[in-house]
Amino acid sequence: MNLSVHSNIRCLKDINFFDLMTPKATQDLTHSTKEQINTEELVKNCYEKFKKNYSKDSELPFLDRNFHIKFLQRGIRNLPSSFECLDASQPWICYWILHSLYLLDADFSEELIDEVTKFLDTCQNETGGFGGGPGQISHLATTYAAVNALCTLNSDRALKIIKVKPLLSWIKSLIMENGEMRMHTDGEVDVRGAYCAISVAKLCNLEQFEPKLFEKVSDWILSCQTYEGGFGATPFNEAHGGYSFCALAALKLMAKENLCDIEKLTYWLVNKQMKFEGGFQGRTNKLVDCCYSFWQGGMFPIIHSVLMSDSDYLQENQNWLFDSESLQEYILICCQANFGGIIDKPGKNRDYYHTCYGLSGLSVSQYCMDNTVNICENDDSLVNRTHPLFNIGFEGANRAINYFKDHLIETLD
Amino acid sequence: MSDSESSDDYDSIAIDKNEWSDLNPINQDHETNEICRIAYTENFNDVFGYFRAVLKANEISERAFDLTYKAVKLNPANYTVWFYRRILLKELGKDLNHELKLVTQIIDQNPKNYQVWQHRRNVVELLQDPSKELEFTEKILQQDSKNYHAWQYRQWVNKNFALWDQELDFVSSLITVDYKNNSAWNHRFFCLINTDHSESVLNREVDYCFEKLNLNINNESVWNYLRGLVDLMVKEGWGYPEKVCHFCNLKLESNKEDELSPFLISFKIDYNWTRAIEKKNSDANAVKEFVQQSIQYLNLLAQKYDTIRANYWKYLLSKWKQEFDQYF
């Protein structure tokens, strides 16, 4: 067998790899354990299949770019009726697809840029913000998605359509007395709202008009950190990867990330990587899911930036504090669907959401500071780099930030 | 209210266009728009076409109210429809108890949907009647004991209506069924903080942890909860509970391979760190012991017991070296 550089892959090099699985001969037959064991079986099948295939083709694993791109390009224009359940999330569909295409280095034609811009403008409301589709009231999540999608187009004519002053006043109306934020008028409160609002505010330079806009929000976010170290949706809710990412990224955007208990967060977070599967779970004692590759994995660059100020070791060390290679193994070996798209876990169907966040997590794991980590033989499997706070390309983010700084005067009514 | 509202058949969600002949539907523009074109089924298209028109015209009427029902059945995630339905509920003076029955059904069919839980919260807030809420969330948790929305909603009910009496028993029964149900452990901590967390109660909780750890030493939920308890006890000024330290040492010294849970080991390392910092300038021998044991354990974790977290264990090693470098 040809032991080339990249066969550091655990199922190839480690004869005891499958010993990492949860022991089955156990008195513990709780539901949680049964679910975990079943999932590990499905994942094991993937790794074993991979071993067989590798013996015939040492080019494996690789990122199946072409199939993923085809899957994505189909979805940006026409979607089957099964997407009726996402009728109130149309900007999300745009963002998931466009960001994935960006990561895969696919080009956007001038026509596509104009068409997406025009479409998202129909989702925008005169009173500020974007809804889930034309004629829908504005929602923080769809606003976040729309702004991210527009930034991903990397074009001034896309950014131009954002109505900044109404956006600001609408966001303000969603900030409550105690710093919590509603997702829409009369809508639910949780930490996603804070992240969506702050992310959009940074990209569109809303604080030029109101520097203390989110003053009370940071304290509320801090109160969402639980005894486990992660953050929940609202104070005292269970620590959860999605909400934790929102909390930490929002705090970082406000330069208040060091106000939370970073050590406790880090301890909780590192324990969310599954020792056999390689991917991340969202909560303690739950199952691996590829989307957490980003929600959980994406917190490490932020944590690194905090901890390294006090640590020579981290300044010199060119690795995030998790096992990047094992995460890549899970994504590339277990989660690529046969004809394009990325899945939650073996046995599940592909969708644009998991494709976006699987690829985003892959990006985080491939780029650490100045270092590249790639379990694949070929650089062709490297995706583009994602901004760990906004989760869009750096070019798109920087263009937006500069555009809205430069266009101060024009946007004032 | 018609019977058809409680059945799931097609008639209850189909629109009768004759009823709407006075209004022009506002359709999605699939002619000039080329992005995100969902192939809506005919009824879906009609219902939402008329809904958009109703919303724009600000129509307050029974037919608008019935239309919102059809719309949320077709897409319960359409938050605009729920938003408008709440306006209609108020303006038309609708029966909120009936609405509660309705949202009960819809949550049952869509338990992971944000909008339906928020709607229930809005209705219950208006009714100021929590009498069905604990039973309802319990039912949902029977289907999925970790449903995040259900737990979040239950916490709101507990806090908002000060309903705490059943909680400890409820959470204990769930933990008995599945001691890895982290949502239940989290809820337990929430209850503790909001009710009695005196020293004797926390001591009892520590014993509860030991009981569960004796069933399975490698249960992260319990270790995290135990850390929470210990932090609380220290914060309240009762000092680090010695029996916790004793329990850990006992398990560590038993030397059985399957007893050496990485959570146990890292718990001890964390304890050692706190103690070592405390005694840094007063008891060099004690500090030396803490340092040596911690280094040994961190190396074991990185190389043998928890290799996927090797980067993290090595980082902790560097922290020990940085802080206590005179002991190396």
Image: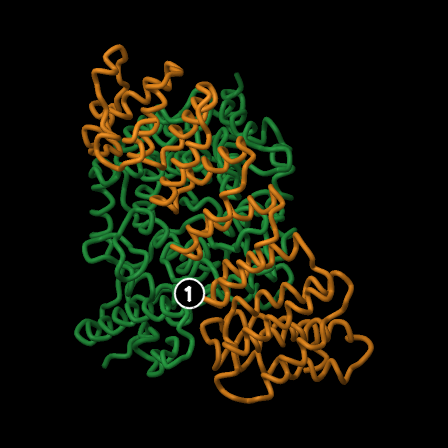
Chain colours: A green, B orange
Give how far across and how far down residue B118 sits, in percent.
47, 37
Give how far across and how far down residue B242 sits, in percent.
72, 76
Work out which quarter of the rendered image holds the C terminus of chain B and state it: bottom right
**Which of the two residues, A114 or B312, is positioned nearer the viewer here?**
B312
**Which of the two residues, B177 or A134, is positioned nearer the viewer here?**
B177
Tell me the amino acid under the disc marked 1: Ser
| Element class at badge 1 | helix
Q: Specify few, some or many for label 1: CA neighbours under 10 Å numbering under 14, 14-19, or 20 or more.
A: many
* Residue A100 in the figure: left or right of residue B11: right
Res. A402 in view: no
* Residue B102 in the figure: left or right of residue A377: right
**Which of the two residues, B58 or A213, is positioned nearer the viewer here?**
B58
Label 1, on which residue? Answer: A324
Q: Identify whether A324 is placed above or below A352.
A: below
Work out which quarter of the rendered image holds the N terminus of chain B and state it: top left
Residue at (48, 80) in percent of width and height = B305
- Residue closest to the far top: B22
Residue at (32, 41) in percent of width and height = A98
Residue at (38, 79) in percent of width and height = A23
Query: Label 1 is found on which chain of the structure?
Result: A
Give how far across and how far down residue B115 sits, in percent.
42, 37
* Residue B214 in the figure: left or right of residue B60: right
